[in-house]
Amino acid sequence: MVLRRPARSRFELRAITRTDIVRVMAHLTVSVEYGLHCLLWLAGSDKPLSSRDLADLQGISHSFVAKIFPKLERAGIVHASGGVRGGYLLARVPEDISVLQVVDAIEGRKPLFDCQEIRGRCAIFGGAPPQWATGGVCAIHLVMLRAEKAMRDTLASQSLADIGQNVAKKAPSHFSSDVEDWITTRLSGRLGKPSTSSSGEEVLS
Amino acid sequence: MVLRRPARSRFELRAITRTDIVRVMAHLTVSVEYGLHCLLWLAGSDKPLSSRDLADLQGISHSFVAKIFPKLERAGIVHASGGVRGGYLLARVPEDISVLQVVDAIEGRKPLFDCQEIRGRCAIFGGAPPQWATGGVCAIHLVMLRAEKAMRDTLASQSLADIGQNVAKKAPSHFSSDVEDWITTRLSGRLGKPSTSSSGEEVLS
């Protein structure tokens, strides 16, 4: 008896390609990375910074940051003020902002596992699954929910202040004053350009 | 000063739609769900079952199951045999097959968070980030790695046997014999169709 394996068809190739694309997209996306980096700058600043200030300071796309910050504002993580001196400030101290809160604000409550409830489709049930088979949480889903909880608990246990302290341990003593100088120069430039600041758009956009 | 928010443009609408699509795709996909359900049937069977048997028993797509099982075989989770009585059997006892092993076999080592290392792009560094800024693991990435470890530890702590026991607690006493009868009838049908079994394809495909 010959053990045959199905030949790779064009359809199968396409399906594998789709899988690879899914793999590239991590569960916690680059928006979370951008958001957390920018929030760290706000944690060290007593001056409001616009999304453009934050994007330029971090060296990332302004349009990307401009999409993230309204979500952080809606979640009560940052406070926005308008005007020539306006921008974003943290709405709470960094110790009270957990990584989980930032992740949920940016990503929404994206499940780790999206149970399709296939348990009721078993051939034995003939299309009419009994209550015992579909009641409560599926045993497989339950394991995934536990794994998700472990992940979320870890993210909840870490605050913006914890991350900031880890960065500060590595940075030389002059770094915070370098950042402060950059911000001061930036804000002075903003004040020196009344044509840009008159609309207030530059401040938050 | 007026606080202006950017109007919703067509571009922004498209970006939001893309985000929603990403949200639908959970980190642990339907392949894991299908794979685990099918492995549970193998955990309760001493007879080899083909991917078609498993798909029909679970009421799911055969082509989907046929893509999953070669991955489980390569990972040493199932053993494949050819021939008219062939099919898949678990390669180890269900107590020795963790959910994590199944997830990794099916999904590959997909990261929870794909760090883009943007820390080196800070404007202060002027394009030449110092060693302290880029050495070691990024403080944000570290938090994500801890969260991923917590998730993986939970998946590693649960075996196929644990899930099977949870299902067995809910099922009535006649369920396992119903399944056994279904399998016996199925395998008898296979033996009674020499034209199908002669190629051996039906068994593993």
Image (tube, coloured by chain):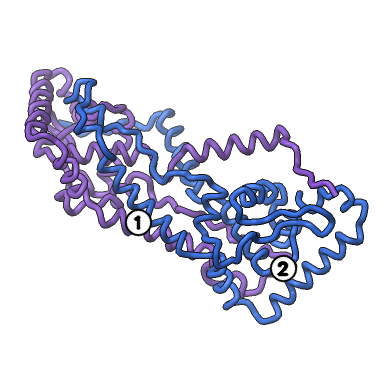
Chain colours: A purple, B blue
The residue positioned 58% from the left and 56% from the top of the image is B33
Left or right of A144, for residue A173? left
Compared across the picture, whether B164 is left or right of A24 comes to right
Q: Is residue B170 above or below residue A54?
A: below
| Discs 2, 1 touching: Cβ within 8 Å | no
Q: Quadrant of residue A149?
A: bottom left
Q: Amino acid at mark 2?
A: Asp
B3 vs B54: above or below: above
Location of mark 2 (residue) = B46
Question: Which residue is at 29% across, 31% downward?
Answer: B118
Query: Could you tell me which secondary element the residue under label 1 belongs to?
Result: helix
Task: Work out which quarter of the rendered image holds the N terminus of chain B and state it.
Answer: top left
* Dot 1 amino acid type: Arg
Q: Quadrant of residue A27?
A: top left
**Residue A91: where, in percent of width, then height?**
17, 47
- Image x and y of residue B154, in percent: 42, 61
Residue A181 occupies which quadrant of the picture?
A: top left
Residue A201 visible in the snapshot? no
Q: Which mark is residue A152?
A: 1
Q: Secondary structure at mark 2?
A: loop
**Camera-nearest label, 2 or 1:** 2
